[in-house]
Amino acid sequence: MTTSEHFAQPTRPDPAQSARAQTACFSVHGVADPGLLPRVIGLWAKRGLVPTRCHSAVCGQGDNELYIDLEMPELGVDLATQIAGELRQIWGVTQVLMSVDGDRLSA
């Protein structure tokens, strides 16, 4: 048995969960705290998902803000909205923007 056989296969989002699976983009703004990035990425990890794109940058006056942009294909609107709501509950997050296939859904 190889090492990779010991790990459970990640679950993919179910396209039937919403009318049409789409690419969801998230922009998360928060305090530049060392623990913020792992807490944000943890929302995907607990679902067995890996975002196809992830970019973070320290910005703001005095470098006190962290901006994190994530992209996840084949994510239905319902699940994307749920994840955005969970992102907003993370300590240190000040704003979450979400779009699905270019249509901005929340600010």
Image (cartoon, rainbow, N blue to C red):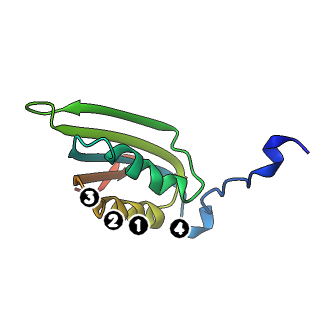
Q: Earlier in the sequence, mark 2 or mark 4?
A: 4
Q: Residue tagged by mark 3?
A: 91
Residue under numbered circle 1: 82
Q: Residues within 10 Å of mark 3 (few under 14, many from 20)?
A: some
Alpha-carbon distance for marks 3 and 1? Answer: 17 Å
Q: Is residue 103 above or below residue 66?
A: below
Q: Residues within 10 Å of mark 2 (few under 14, many from 20)?
A: few
At 73% across and 53% down in the image, what residue appears? Answer: 9
Dot placed on the residue nearer the N-terminal end, 4 or 3: 4
Q: Amino acid at mark 4?
A: Ser
Looking at marks 3 and 2 on the same chain, the residue that comes earlier in the sequence is marked by: 2
Q: Which element is circle 1 on?
A: helix
- Quarter where residue 21 is shown: bottom right
Between 98 and 103, the one nearer to me in the picture: 98
Q: For the residue marked with disc 2, what is the amino acid? A: Gly
Q: CA distance from mark 4 to mark 3?
A: 29 Å
Q: Which residue is mark 4?
A: 18
Q: Residues within 10 Å of mark 4 (few under 14, many from 20)?
A: few
Residue at 81 percent across and 42 percent down: it is 3
Residue receiving disc 2: 85
- Quadrant of the frame with the N terminus: top right
